[in-house]
Every structure is written in structure tokens, then in C-alpha cells.
Image (cartoon, rainbow, N blue to C red):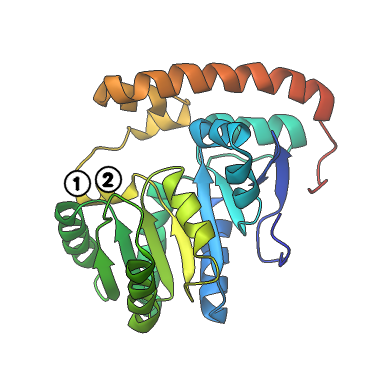
Amino acid sequence: MATHESALWPPRYDVFGVGISAATYNTARDAVFAAAATGRPFCTTHLAVHGLIEATRHADLRDALNQFDMVAPDGQPVRHALNLLYRTGLADNCRGPVLMPLVCERAAKEAVPVYLYGSTQAVIDALCRNLTERYPGLIIAGAEPSLFRPLTAEEDRELAERVNGSGARILLLGLGCPLQERFAYAHRETFNTVQMCVGAAFDFQAGNKKMAPAWMTRHSLEWLYRLCQEPRRLFTRYFVTNSLFMLKLLPYALRLRKPAGRRE
């Protein structure tokens, strides 16, 4: 786990070797702005089943995530696992695409500049337009698409100069899991900002993709909605990783279920 824990960050619990934060939208947003106010580096992300299973397969990703300050339960199954194993009593998950607009709304009210990095130029253009229309006063200190390849050392240095020189306090990363988590971890001491991995939030907020209806999300059916939208890309992810998740959860629950309040 990150060594610079604070009482301001939601507590974390071990799920398959990854510290998952018992975060709600309110506590996650408060943690982001508490970190932004200090000007210290801070890394946060949201893990659904796919990201969690990927972390069990790749030790470097698992180790990186355990150095994050906050890893919120994006998927309902991950929330259910926290409740089952540790009785955290979470009533809802904490998804990047939902937290991002909440953060932008508060950033607009408090004049906290944000920086957008990821996706394509077309998505970035639509995202900037939509966010500034929805949240008057939002300061977008910079916005640029991903190059969809590893950066050269010079490109990396120039990106850091742009982000740090922009005055942004929150860097929103829309690179997809696990690329964005690896990116944030690699730059945890490079950017003088909160790094907030938000996954598909850029596409949703830009209007490029539609979010699942609230009732489907509440009943853990968002995966089905997204599968219907992108069956070829998501079939293997959902059916393989969801099956692995269930196979891991039962013996893990029998072995590691602990009293409420115990932190990792």
C-alpha cells in the first residue's frame, strides 16, 4: 500500500492481493480535493473486475496499484467483494465515469484547474466543449490526446513540462485500464498534480458512448449493457475475467473474511 496514508483517504482492504479502498463518491471526491489543496502528488483509480483480475495476473501492475493512494471499487462485483469479505457496508460502487463529472463540478466552483490527457483529438475537443458548457467556470488548463504508443524520453519530459507549467491541480487520465494505471504509477513523482484515472469517462462525457441506465448499474448489469454495445471487444473480457473472479472469490471469502473495521 502507499506509505503516505492519511486519515483523509478511504481505508483499504486486501482483495486478491490488491488494496481496494472502501470509497464512496463523496469520500473519493473529498480525497481528491484534499490532495489537490496540498499540491502533493496523488494517484487514484477505479477497478472493476477486469482490472482486478489483470492485477492478479501481472505482479508489476499489482505492485503499482498498491502504491496508489486510492483504488475505488468501480464494478458492483468488487463492491460486493468488499462487503462480503470485510463488511464495509458500501451501498454503491464508485465509478470513474460518475466521479469525474462530480470532480469537474466542484473544480468549477472552487476554481481548481484540471488537465485532460488521453483518447483521440476528436474526443478531447468534444469533451472540452461539453465540460465547459455543463460546468461554467471550469478551468481546463490543458487538454491533449494520447499518442497511442510509448512516449520517447523527450516527449515524456515535454509532457511533464506542459502539465506542471499549466497550473493544473488535477490531471484526468482517460487511457483505459491498465494502461492509465501504469502511466500514473510511472509519473507519480513527475507530475505535481493529482492523477485521476477515469477510464471510459472521456468517451461518455464527450458523448461518444452511452452509459448504462442507472437501474442496470444498481443491479450489477452494466457489463451486459456494454457487452451489447461492443460484443467483439468485450466478450472475452467479461466472460473470462468474470468467471475467474467468481472462482477466486469463494475460496478467498472462506479463508480471509475478517471482522468489520480491519484495515490492510
| Mark 1 touches mark 2? (CB < 8 Å) | yes
Q: In this view, does 232 lie to the left or right of 75?
A: left
Q: Can residue 225 be seen in this view?
A: no
Q: Is residue 13 visible?
A: yes
Q: Is residue 262 left or right of residue 136?
A: right
Where is 218 relative to 187, above or below? above
Identity of the amino acid at label 1?
Answer: Gly
Give residue 96's position: percent from left, percent from top. Answer: 43, 49
Q: Which residue is drawn at 30% across and 37% down?
A: 211
Where is 232 relative to 100, above or below? above
Identity of the amino acid at label 2?
Answer: Phe
Residue assigned mark 1: 207
Quarter of the image with the N terminus in it: bottom right
Q: Circle 2 — which element?
A: helix
Residue assigned mark 2: 204
Closer-to-camera residue (22/159): 159
Q: Residue at x 19, y 52 (%)?
A: 123
Where is 148 relative to 124, above or below? above
Quadrant of the rendered structure where residue 38 is? Answer: bottom right
Closer-to-camera residue (244/59): 59
Q: Which residue is drawn at 59% across and 31% down?
A: 57
Q: Which residue is drawn at 51% across and 46% down?
A: 46
Q: Circle 1 — which element?
A: loop
For label 1, count other residues whose C-alpha is less than 10 Å away and answer few (under 14), some (14-19) or many (20+): some
Mark 1 to mark 2 CA distance (whole Å): 5 Å
Quadrant of the rendered structure where residue 176 is? Answer: top left
Give residue 19's position: percent from left, percent from top. Answer: 68, 46
Give residue 118's position: percent from left, percent from top. Answer: 30, 55
Q: In this view, does 242 lie to the left or right of 173?
A: right
Q: Is residue 79 left or right of residue 206?
A: right
